[in-house]
Image (cartoon, helix red, strand yellow):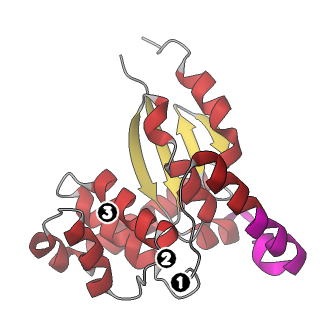
Amino acid sequence: MTQRLEFFFDFASPYSYLAHSQLGGLGAEVAVRPMRVLKVMEAVGNQPTTIQSAAKGRYAFADLGRWAARYGVPINARNMRKNDSAACARAVLAAGRLGKAREATAALFHAFWGAGEPLTTNWEILAVLDKAGLDIKALEPLLDDPSVATELDANTTEAAERGVFGAPTIFVGEDMFFGNDRLDFVRERLNQPVAA
């Protein structure tokens, strides 16, 4: 039986992008769980030190390049501060109602961090999803649907309640793994027998 993992992430997190690029190689069923990471951090008393500390921010920029090279994925932070990560998250949840959450996540991560495309409006987000083959006529009315925003809030609240303090965070069952650099531990956990 295939193991399942939950991937809690925020599009604003470059380490979420990097971790996401490797999930397909884990041989698990992936449930994508977008959240608002700054809201989670606020709820649990964590601080976004990479943003607050210029020295850590400079280091992270170099570190991201190293990880991207290791994974063989492009990284382009050109629009990261302008892009609307919450709107991208809502687009994933909307796509989930059409059974296309994973496809939307992959397309938006590539646009956000791989290609450095602008994702500041619903139209820019829909254009990316259209190129990925999603039904944007069905998606467009869902992007600003209050129930989609409520689902994003619920994911954020659930993440904080389950002990999440940053992005990305992966759960296999109730075992939690934080960070792009914990994928080896995730792989080991997935290789353990599934409880009956």
Camera-side residue of 109 and 86: 109
Category of crowding for the residue at label 3, using alpha-carbon neighbours closer than 10 angstroms: few (below 14), some (14–19), many (at least 20): many
Category of crowding for the residue at label 2, using alpha-carbon neighbours closer than 10 angstroms: few (below 14), some (14–19), many (at least 20): some
User: Mark 1 or 3, which is nearer the eye?
Assistant: 1
Vertically, is 43 above or below 96?
below
Element type where label 3 sits in the image: helix
Proximity of marks 1 and 3: CB atoms separated by less than 8 Å: no
Residue stretch in magenta: 44-62
In the displayed structure, does residue 162 sit left or right of residue 33? right
In the displayed structure, does residue 70 sit left or right of residue 128? right
* Residue 127, numbered circle: none
* Residue 116, numbered circle: 2
In the image, what residue type sits under mark 2? Answer: Gly
**Residue at numbered disc 1:** 79
Residue at horizontal 62 percent and vertical 22 percent from the top: 188
**Residue at numbered disc 3:** 93
In the image, what residue type sits under mark 3? Answer: Leu
In the image, what residue type sits under mark 1? Answer: Asn
Vertically, is 31 above or below 66?
above
Residue at horizontal 53 percent and vertical 58 percent from the top: 9
Element type where label 1 sits in the image: loop
Residue at horizontal 11 percent and vertical 70 percent from the top: 138
Residue 5 placed where, x, y %?
47, 36
Marked residue nearer the N-terminal end (1 or 2): 1
Proximity of marks 1 and 2: CB atoms separated by less than 8 Å: yes
